[in-house]
Structures are given as structure tokens and as C-alpha cells.
């Protein structure tokens, strides 16, 4: 049985895979048509507050 996939799911998968492969965010944003980083992060499901908290935890260990 095939799972029906939407175009949105395909674009989101494309964007997510490219980000994880270290393709510059600006290039992926151009490909998906996003104009702001905030909207792009929301599209990928990235919580900015969560990123800041993770950074702070990591920064304390390095310093």
C-alpha cells in the first residue's frame, strides 16, 4: 500500500534534508520561496527558544 504524499511534505523533506547536509540556509530558503528566516524556521518546526537554550547549555561547557 502506498502512502499518499503531498507536495508540501515533499518540499519540507527537501528543505530538512538539505539543512542537515549543511547546505547554506539562504540557498534552501531560495529554493522553498521563504523570504525570512523566522518563517523558514517555523516551516521546519524549529523552536528558536529551544535553540537558544541548547546553545547556552553547550556554551557553558566549552567556556
Image: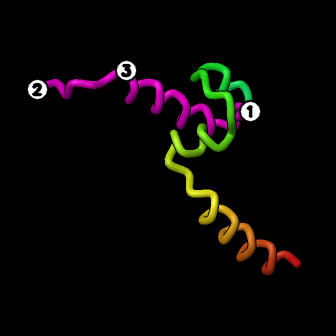
Q: Is residue 37 above or below residue 8?
A: below
Q: CA distance from mark 1 to mark 3?
A: 22 Å
Q: Where's residue 49, x and y in %?
A: 63, 64
> Is residue 37 found inside the magenta-colored segment of the image?
no
Pinpoint residue 16: horizontal percent, then vertical percent.
Answer: 53, 37
Tell me the element at label 3. Answer: helix
Q: Nearer the viewer, mark 2 or mark 3?
A: 3
Who's the residue at 60% across and 21% down the image? Answer: 33
Q: Residues within 10 Å of mark 2 (few under 14, many from 20)?
A: few
Q: Which residue is mark 1?
A: 24
State the image coordinates of residue 53 (x, y, percent, origin top left): 66, 71
Q: Residue at x 59, y 44 (%)?
A: 41
Mark sitting on residue 7: 3
| Res 58 visible | yes
Give the residue pinned by disc 2: 1
Picture quadrant of residue 50: bottom right
Question: The magenta stretch spans which residues?
Answer: 2-25
Note whether 7 is above or below 37 in the view shown.
above
Q: Say which label, 1 or 2, has the lower sequence index.
A: 2
Which quadrant of the figure has residue 1?
Answer: top left
Amino acid at each position: 500500500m502506498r502512502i499518499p504524499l503531498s507536495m508540501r511534505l515533499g518540499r519540507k523533506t527537501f528543505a530538512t534534508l538539505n539543512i542537515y547536509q549543511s547546505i547554506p540556509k539562504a540557498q534552501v530558503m531560495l529554493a522553498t520561496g521563504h523570504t525570512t528566516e523566522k518563517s523558514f524556521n517555523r516551516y521546519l518546526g524549529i523552536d528558536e527558544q529551544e535553540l537558544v537554550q541548547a546553545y547556552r547549555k553547550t556554551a557553558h561547557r566549552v567556556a
